[in-house]
Amino acid sequence: MAAVSPSAVRASQAVRAVIGRLRRRIRASGGTEGITLSQGSVLARLTDNEGLAVSDLAAIEGVRHQSMAATVSALAALALVERRPDPADGRRQLIALTAEGRHRAEAGRQARGEWLAGELEHKCTEAERQTVIAAMAVLERIAHD
């Protein structure tokens, strides 16, 4: 590996630290009363999918199958998700959002977006918001290279 400049190392540390804290703050602002952060994360994952197996959700979230099974069971008990047979493999079940689960996930997404926009509005100047937009373009380029 080629030598990395001190500024690249500092930038890397800063980005990772800030993204971690920001991610926690965004997740906490999600308007997910009555459910845990991990349950809210599963609801968010399922909004873009017609259904995922517990093992798929566990892999995506980086948790053990047993932990995800417990999370899914709790969401099912709240009638936020349902189990459906996998049309491609009848032995598997897919986890999908119920209408209420979709409503809660979308409300959480909206609450998180509103929280972040509000924080950017109240804590940043217009020039700082433009800097954030420019920085996001740089990070997007890094993420897709």
Image (cartoon, helix red, strand yellow):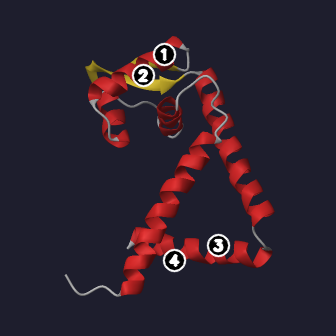
> Which is nearer the eye, 123 or 113?
123
Q: Which residue is mark 1?
A: 76
The CA distance from mark 1 to mark 3 is: 39 Å
Q: Earlier in the sequence, mark 2 or mark 4?
A: 2
Q: Which residue is mark 4?
A: 138
Q: Position of residue 50 (x, y in %)?
A: 47, 32
Q: Earlier in the sequence, mark 2 or mark 3?
A: 2
**Crowd tier of the residue under label 2, counting other residues whose Cα lies within 10 Å: few below 14, some 14–19, many 20 or above:** many
Taking the spot 71% from the left edge, 49% from the top edge, the residue there is 115
> Which is nearer the eye, 116 or 51?
116
The CA distance from mark 2 to mark 4 is: 36 Å
Point out which mark residue 133 bears: 3
**Cβ atoms under marks 4 and 1 closer than 8 Å:** no
Image-based side of 54 in relation to 111, left or right: left
Three-letter code for the amino acid on which mark 4 is drawn: Val
The CA distance from mark 4 to mark 1 is: 40 Å
Taking the spot 42% from the left edge, 70% from the top edge, the residue there is 13
Q: Position of residue 142 (x, y in %)?
A: 42, 73
Q: Which residue is mark 2?
A: 72
| Local SS, label 3 | helix
Image-based side of 23 in relation to 125, left or right: left
Residue 24 at least partly seen: yes
**Cβ atoms under marks 2 and 1 closer than 8 Å:** yes
Query: Is the N terminus in the top left, top right, bottom left or bottom right quadrant?
Result: bottom left
Three-letter code for the amino acid on which mark 3 is drawn: Ile
Taking the spot 22% from the left edge, 86% from the top edge, the residue there is 2
Three-letter code for the amino acid on which mark 2 is drawn: Val
**Crowd tier of the residue under label 3, counting other residues whose Cα lies within 10 Å: few below 14, some 14–19, many 20 or above:** few
Q: Position of residue 122 (x, y in %)?
A: 80, 61
Q: Position of residue 6 (x, y in %)?
A: 37, 85
> Which is nearer the eye, 101 or 16?
16
